[in-house]
Image (cartoon, grey):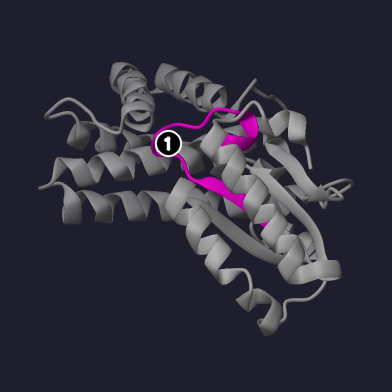
Amino acid sequence: MENEFLTTLPANISRALTSFVKAASQAFGDDLRAVVLYGSAAEGKLRVTSDVNVLVVLSAFEQGKADQLREPLRLAHAAVRLTAMFLLESEVSPAAEAFAVKFADIARRRRVLYGSDPFAGLTISRRAEIIRLKQTLLNLTLRLREAYVSRSLREEQLIVVIADAAGPLRSCAAALLELEGSSADSPKAALERVAASLSQAVTEHEVGWAEALSRVSEARREGMLPSGVAGPTLFGLIELARAMQSRASALS
């Protein structure tokens, strides 16, 4: 385990990850191939609304062994919002093709906590990533519209939606730049860069998108927003996702 990296995380996160990896090793034994931390925790950029995400790679998923990890996972989720994805090692490559945007983001932001790196040498086809990028942005647009209509009477609920939208929007922006032959220092910087370049073509959104992204960061950092801004912020994110989807459709 990368003990040196874990010491850079908040103490409660470090303890929870250490305990979970130990429990996974005890539960699955030789079937455990790797535990990979990914997302904002792997970057050391956790916010109050952040989940702690791990990928558990196995040679086999047996019920008796999985049962032993149920309580440790429940405790870790309660303590630090830890969520785990369980994947067989034979499924890594197919999953990367099927969920290209997500797995490309994991490949960019990961820390191997146990075992060997399942992403070493992994390649994701350009065609799969373009298809999945367009699907992800369309799905996000539809989900955000539904969330606005169903939750906007309670601003505190919209704030959670806005904070949760940061991850997929940022990973899509990073994927978009990479597919265009460019890059950014982080997914957050990628989204800011994409939004700025889109604003040049759609002038009326120039201020709105910049403000919306600043509100996203505020929602993630503070878990709250000033009264009256959640609705317009969510609408800005919907329009930004649609603009990104149009740009992705031009890729070949």
Q: Residues within 10 Å of mark 1 (few under 14, many from 20)?
A: some
**Residue that sits furthest to the bottom in the current view:** 63
Give the quadrant of residue 7.
top right
Residue 51 covered by magenta stretch: yes
Vertical placement of residue 1 versus 23, above or below? above
Residue pictured at 49% horizontal, 40% vertical = 167
Q: Quadrant of the N terminus?
A: top right
Q: Which residue is mark 1?
A: 243
Query: Could you say whether the residue bearing mark 1 is in a helix, strand or loop?
Result: helix
Residue closer to the observer: 71 or 49: 71
Question: What is the magenta range?
Answer: 41-55
Give the quadrant of residue 164.
top left
Q: Position of residue 171 (x, y in %)?
A: 57, 39
Q: Is residue 153 visible?
A: yes
Residue pictured at 87% horizontal, 46% vertical = 120
- Residue type at mark 1 is Ala
Residue pictured at 67% horizontal, 62% vertical = 98
Residue closer to the observer: 225 or 72: 72
